Image (cartoon, helix red, strand yellow):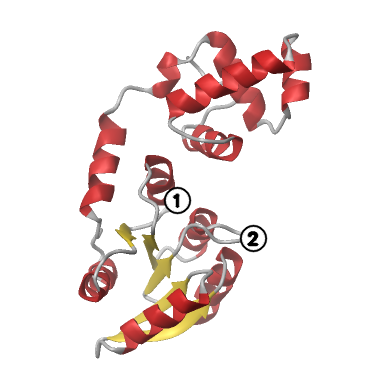
Amino acid sequence: MIRVLVADDHGVVREGLGRLIDAFADLELVGTAADGAQAVEQALAHVPDVVLMDLDMPHVDGIEATRRIAAAQPQVAVLVLTSFSDSARITGAMDAGAVGYLLKDASADQVAEGVRAAARGESPLDPRAARTILTARSAPDPLAALSHREREVLELLVEGLPNKLIARRLDISEKTVKTHLTSVFRHLGVSDRTQAALWAERHRLGRGSQG
């Protein structure tokens, strides 16, 4: 019997996944969570074989929850099940310790087989996610496309400085900071400051980094 924990912030989705799991004789639902913090708590309490993890959740998102579960309970397989197929989220989830990545338009049988594969120690990947990962891994380093000043702005963003303080630190205008950030976001393939900071953390970018 494969013990499964479901983490999703939408009640209808949690209930639907619960019924799906109960429909298979070899799967057992041991708990549900409405956000990432609850997912970590439930994983510690129930020690499931597999966690079906949504990514876009309040309080603690699925990527951070995955990271915490992987660190505390490496024997628990976290299988992402989400509607997002962008490179930043996929690579973020896998770097955090997820063993697989499925999209919510998968069939019930595909989800069940993904859970079984994760429990066997395999890495079930939606074909679109697999292509995205391969493209991201083989693509040129986006940092190489950044100017020296753009990289400085990104490093200060990672430190948590707002645009006003970045401008003061670098002795440039806030408008120039915004222009540099727009360019940085485009090169990194992200859409906001939070995603840029997460990207930089995954690539160990910060003050004192080389290159």
Q: Position of residue 38 (x, y in %)?
A: 59, 71
Q: Amino acid at mark 1?
A: Ala
Residue at point 38%, 78% (across, down): 17
Q: Is residue 193 above or below residue 31?
A: above
Q: Position of residue 43 (x, y in %)?
A: 50, 73
**In the drawing, does residue 199 fall left or right of residue 166?**
left
Secondary structure, mark 1, is helix
Disc 1 from disc 2: Cα separation: 17 Å
According to the image, label 2 marks what residue? 59
Q: Quadrant of residue 20?
A: bottom left
According to the image, label 1 marks what residue? 96
**In the drawing, does residue 156 fall left or right of residue 144?**
right
Quadrant where the N terminus sits is: bottom left
Q: Position of residue 30 (x, y in %)?
A: 44, 85
* 57 or 121: nearer the viewer: 57
Figure label count = 2
**In the drawing, does residue 172 fall left or right of residue 70?**
right
Q: Is residue 57 above or below residue 44?
A: above
Q: Is residue 111 above or below residue 200?
A: below
Q: Is residue 99 above or below residue 15?
A: above
Q: Position of residue 166 (x, y in %)?
A: 72, 20
Residue at point 50%, 17% (across, down): 210
Q: Amino acid at mark 2?
A: His
Residue at point 78%, 15% (across, down): 168
